[in-house]
Amino acid sequence: MSYCLNPDCPRPGQNPPEAVVCQACGSHLILQSRYRALRPLGQGGFGRTFLAVDEDKPSKPKCVVKQFLPMEMDAQSYAKASELFQREAIRLDELGHHEQIPNLYAYFEQDRRQYIIQEFIDGNNLARELQLQGPFQEAKALQLLRDLVPVLEFVHGQSVIHRDIKPENLIRSATNRKLYLVDFGAAKFAPSTSMSNLRTIISSAGFTAPEQMVGKSEFVSDLYSLGVTCVHLMTGRPPLELYDMSQDGWVWQEYLAQPVSEGLARILNRLLERATRKRYQSASEVRQDLEALEQGKLQPRLGSSPVPPMSRPTATPPSKLVLTFPQKSGSSTSKSQIKAPTWDCVCTLGPYSNWVTGVTCVEGPGVGIILAIAGKDGIVRVWQLSGQEHLTVTNLWSHTYTAPIMALRLTPNGQYIIGGCEDRTLRVWEVSKGKITQTLGGMFAKHSSPICAVAVSPDGRLVASGSEDKTIRIWELSSGKCLCTLTGHSSHVRALDFTPDGFLLVSGGWDNTLVIWEAANGRSLRTIAEPFRFGDNGFNAVIVSPDSRWIATGNENRLIHLWDFNKGECVHSFPEQKTAVTALTFAPRGNILVSGNQDGVIHTWDMVLRQQRDTLTGHSKQVTGLTFTPDGQFLISSSRDNSVRIWRQP
């Protein structure tokens, strides 16, 4: 089979092996008259990779084609992405002569697209190896370190920081069993020992060093990521589960099937130090300790015993009231084109006895797409959304609480609903049971004023609550414990959002400030203050873009700002609205921002062109919440007009 590299081709994989031109779209199938793509290997934020063959050589050896194809972005971001792609080719050219780094074969532009051709490593990455073979034993983990530390020593010796060390970027060759370090698309050249100017944030959930999350990559950042990779492979657990927020420390040894030696534990714990000065300062230091361990010269302490994972409830069959309506079929459009669609309100839920305070929607394993709303009347209402040709809205249950529920979030797995209540507590509903099973904030732990905002970390372990008492509290969902209280706002905390990797929390208050916190320990990393305007200050809505590049804010002063997460600077302001901006959400791909206003009007904004796309009217009062279904097909809004509307993009 020959695979077409045209991103807009309707049938890219349906070409004969010897074809020269795509039968579906007419594009040329051979790059530089020698490289033929066979099948896709993967896709990331900046491009796609393909398995290919080099037809210029008699043996037709396999190779990898990497095509620059970034997601929709503005001109400045596109230029930055293009620069990173070119930089990857330069890094590969400089580093590829190392036996454990793939060779660069070619870099060129064809049909106005950039391509990198590099050596194909036939084998599984370590994430796949973990799936197939289970957690690594100590001997295997030690061998991983012995294999990779010299590679990092070489890379750092060339003044390059990889910045994306993780199991997916480590491939074990099926031929020689060596580990290869791949994907230098995030790599950064460090021309001097000063890292203060390395401000581009590249992150992979859980594997990224704390300093890298705020744009300050150092050589030791790679060592931290290597440590996280090791403990993940040894435990089989996501990195965020291996860090205890209440202790502000790693607890990976508690999840081991068998304890490891004191020496290996010492090396890993030093790699995992969050403070850069306490971490190994070079790959050479790590290599020296590995050699000392092999000679029996390290004498550290042994870790603690393992603990069992938290059990999850079994869902029970709910009673159903089904509302069904057809989806309209829309014509497909080219990925390279930008069109401004219109939206139809296809379903209205309500009106209810009081205004709806919030709406939340997730898709969880075994539960499908769950939609939940809460209201001033204290009632939580839950639906399941399903269907392809027809959307089915199935009423699962409703539950009445004794106090108004002012903020609402579902855990990412769809198993729990967290409600922030006017009685200053957080109530937890188990979706499968339709009732409250936990309360966060007892007599002495709850807020001193009503809760205004709730956020749940992407792994579902942490819950953040913001209150009129000017504080934020971070809770551990499994234990119900308050891990820390964050103080930094001088007025009501009105909005909260975790970054997609869960390491950082962003808060917005009526004091007209944004604060970025380190979720693990509550440290304030940055405070952003908007210029004061008398009588109409305060953030009502704050949301982080899916790629962590932007913070969008909606304000009482009727403005929507876009902030550079890395620099903390306002990079764009959308046109001033007629009334206060009260709700915001990003589409799952990050290409659309949606805002809701106090007058009930909803606007969609094109993140590429930075201009308005659509105006949605239907609500008669303030929009209180906005969310997309995970597939991005439906937008859901809640309002003070006591209703919820489901909108569809034709």
Image (spheres, rainbow, N blue to C red):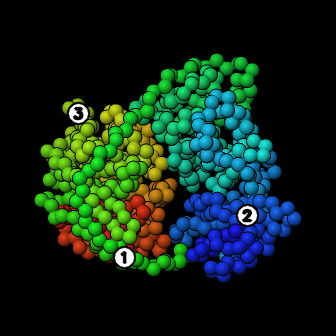
User: Is residue 437 something that shows in the picture?
Assistant: yes
Q: Nearer the viewer, residue 173 or 99?
A: 173
User: Which residue lies under the disc numbered 2?
Assistant: 52
Which label's residue is closer to the chain start, 1 or 2?
Answer: 2
Residue at which label 1 appears = 328
> On the rendered structure, is 192 left or right of 609?
right
Crowdedness near tag 1: few (<14), some (14–19) or many (≥20) residues, C-alpha within 10 Å: few
Marks 2 and 1: in contact by CB < 8 Å?
no
Q: Determine whether 110 is above or below 246 in the image.
A: below
User: Residue beneath label 3, please?
Assistant: 442
| Residue 584 coordinates in the image, percent (x, y) | 34, 62
When the figure is inspected, residue 429 is found, relative to residue 1, above or below; the finding is: above
Q: Secondary structure at mark 3?
A: loop
Q: Earlier in the sequence, mark 1 or mark 3?
A: 1
Helix, strand or loop for disc 1: loop
Amino acid residing under circle 3: Gly
- Taking depth in this image into account, of 421 and 134 the one nearest to the observer is 134
| Percent position of residue 479, x then y | 34, 33
- Residue flagged by tag 1: what amino acid is it? Lys
Q: Is residue 590 above or below residue 434?
A: below
Residue drawn at 49 percent across, 22 percent down:
305
Question: Does 618 sit above or below residue 159?
Answer: below
Q: Residue at x 40, y 32 (%)?
A: 246
Real-space Cα distance between discs 1 and 3? 49 Å
Location of the N terminus (image quadrant) = bottom right
Q: Which corner quadrant holds the C terminus? A: bottom left
Mark whose residue sits in front, 2 or 3: 2
Residue lying furthest right: 58
- How many discs appear? 3
Q: Position of residue 420 (x, y in %)?
A: 25, 46
Residue type at tag 2: Ala
